[in-house]
Amino acid sequence: MENFTPVSASIGGALIGLSAVLLMAFHGRIAGISGLFSGTVFAAKGDRSWRVFFVLGLVAAPLVYWLAAAEKPAFELQAGWPLIIAGGLLVGFGTRLGSGCTSGHGVCGLSRLSPRSMVSVLLFMAAGMVTVALIKPLIGA
Amino acid sequence: MARNLMALLAGLTFGLGLVISQMVNPAKVIAFLDLFGNWDPSLAFVMGAALIVTAIGYRLVWLRQRPVLADSFQVPGNRKVDAKLATGAVLFGIGWGLVGLCPGPAIAALTIGGGPALGFLAAMAVGMLAFELVDRRAAKPA
């Protein structure tokens, strides 16, 4: 528990919520990143440009923080290449098959009390926790 | 133009939330998922705060007839839990646990995560493309 950071976590979470509210207020859309990102290519023509701009904002955010705080955001990834590739494929395919991820189901869906989102969140949290418990001994972490 | 600029602002806000909460850092995410090890519950606060703001904000926004820059609110109406939803969530959860990145952080990490972040994002895009191909084939009548 030595790395417990409830204050910055809550501030960051509130900003994520604010972003979801902005997108609903102005565009009438759910801030589900997997669907939003996939739609930059696969959505109907005319429904793509706002998605590209949202993604650009997302990509720019760490740089803006870096400039403002004069501190590079921490990024520590333990997994090796085979796990990185397998993980990426699973996250990409799984979020599309399951119609959403941590943002679409976890934030937007739960706040709407969607039964689908409740099931999704329980399952992906449980699957993530079991996976970490299983691979930790394997990668020697 | 206004739609694109507001989307840019929303994306920037979302990304700053990911950075400030450290959700963009895979080690932080793995520490949250490591329930049986040295558990760090911080990310529960990310989700809790995001949920409170969204639950209240959505209800205020829905008092309007329509969004500021669009004709209607597009909220998923499907409430049926099915095998596709469950299978997708489990596959996603496994991938999340393997690396510690979900789609939002995977995109935001592009500028700070170097080769591994780029590799993950590319694999994620391939996974999404694979889904589109499978889904389109399944939608075609045999």
Image: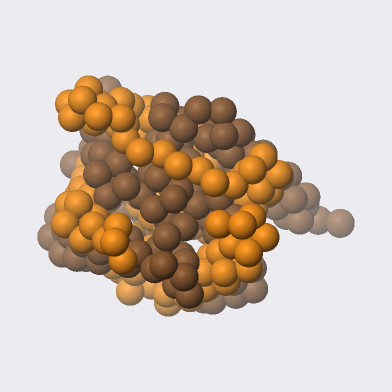
The residue closer to the viewer here, B101 or A140, is A140
In the rendered image, residue B117, in percent from the top left (x then y), is placed at 52, 35
| Image quarter of residue B69 | top left
Is B131 situated above or below B88? above
Q: Is residue A90 above or below residue A51?
A: below
Q: Nearer the viewer, residue B7 or A4?
A: A4
Query: Which chain does brown denote in the image?
Result: B
**Do we see residue A45 in this rendering?**
no
Q: Residue visible at 30% across and 53% down?
A: B73
Q: Is residue A92 above or below residue A3?
A: above
| Image x and y of residue A71, in percent | 25, 29
Residue B112: % across, % down: 41, 30
Residue B24 vertical position relative to residue B92 in the rendered view, above or below: above
Left or right, B142 with reference to B34: right
Residue at image position (21%, 61%) is: A6
User: What kind of colouring is applied to the model shown?
Assistant: by chain
Q: Residue at x 24, y 44 (%)?
A: B20
In the rendered view, does B135 fall on the left or right side of B79? Answer: right
Query: Looking at the image, can residue B73 be seen?
Result: yes
B93 lies left or right of B9: right
> Which residue is painted at 38% across and 44% down in the image?
B24
Count of picture labels: 0
Quadrant that contains the C terminus of chain A: bottom right
Q: Quadrant of the N terminus of chain A?
A: bottom left
Q: Quadrant of residue A84?
A: top right
Residue B116 rendering spot, x and y as whole percentages: 57, 34
Q: Which chain is orange?
A: A
A48 left or right of B7? right
